[in-house]
Image (spheres, rainbow, N blue to C red):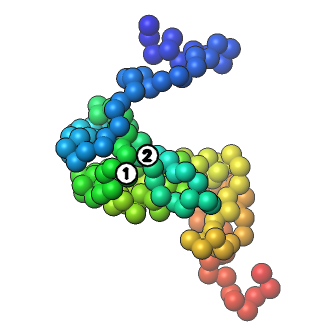
Amino acid sequence: MTDDDQRGDRENPVPLLEPRDGMPPVVITGEALAEAISRLAGGTGPLAVDAERASGYRYGQRAYLVQLRRAQAGTVLIDPIACPDLSGLDTALADSEAVLHAASQDLPCLAEIGYRPRRLFDTELAGRLLGYGSLAARSGGGRRLFPRVRHLPYPEQLYIEVCGLIFKDPGGDD
């Protein structure tokens, strides 16, 4: 079966019921964490990162599962309760680009456990900038940072718009 057969098409989608390589074991020991970090460091390309939280409202932002995937390294699932220090991952992958969805949701809980990506691609933000939805940036305290930015087809126009919103004249009418 080819990759195309596994993906299906629009008329005949193939449900994704489990990871392509099977379900990996959850990392719960320091030894397994060191092995996983070594495997991820030996991979290539960007690192897909996702953190699962119980709830940002009732239970706080603490991560209860960290999911990572990188080409030639496979998928790694880490229990951050059992392995609360991911600073080794942070060091080993300092030069790697991290790909997250809704990074503003995951970055705080990842930072709590020692992983702070330096290069980041947020698929949600990219989609919104390309016109798939809208963007409303907020500060860490939840206050509105600047008004809603609508899709702008030219990146330089977005830059000008954002600079205008950030550095506007405080005495102006806007």
Q: Residue at x 69, y 89 (%)?
A: 170
Report which quarter residue 13 is drawn in: top right
Q: Is residue 97 visible?
A: no
Question: What residue is shown with label 2?
Answer: 65
Using the image as rendered, state which of residue 35 and residue 173 is in the foreground.
35
Determine if residue 7 is in view.
Answer: yes
* Residue ID at (66%, 74%): 143
User: Is 156 on the left or on the right of 66, as rendered?
Assistant: right
Q: Is residue 62 left or right of residue 161?
A: left
Label 1 element class: loop
Q: Which mark is residue 145?
A: none
Instruction: Give the amino acid at mark 1.
Output: Pro
Which residue is at a point 40% across and 49% down the rendered structure image?
A: 98
- Report how many numbered discs are placed on residues in the image: 2
Q: Could you tell me residue 117's position as x and y percent? A: 37, 57
Give whichever of discs 1 and 2 has the lower sequence position: 2
Front position in the image: 17 or 148: 17
* Front-lying residue, 20 or 93: 20
User: Residue 174: image x %, image y %?
Assistant: 77, 81
Rendered-image quadrant of the N terminus: top left
Q: Is residue 89 above or below residue 108?
A: above
Kind of residue sitting beneath label 2:
Leu
Name the residue that disc number 1 marks. Answer: 80
Q: Mark 1: few, some, or many residues within 10 Å (few <14, many ≥20)?
A: many
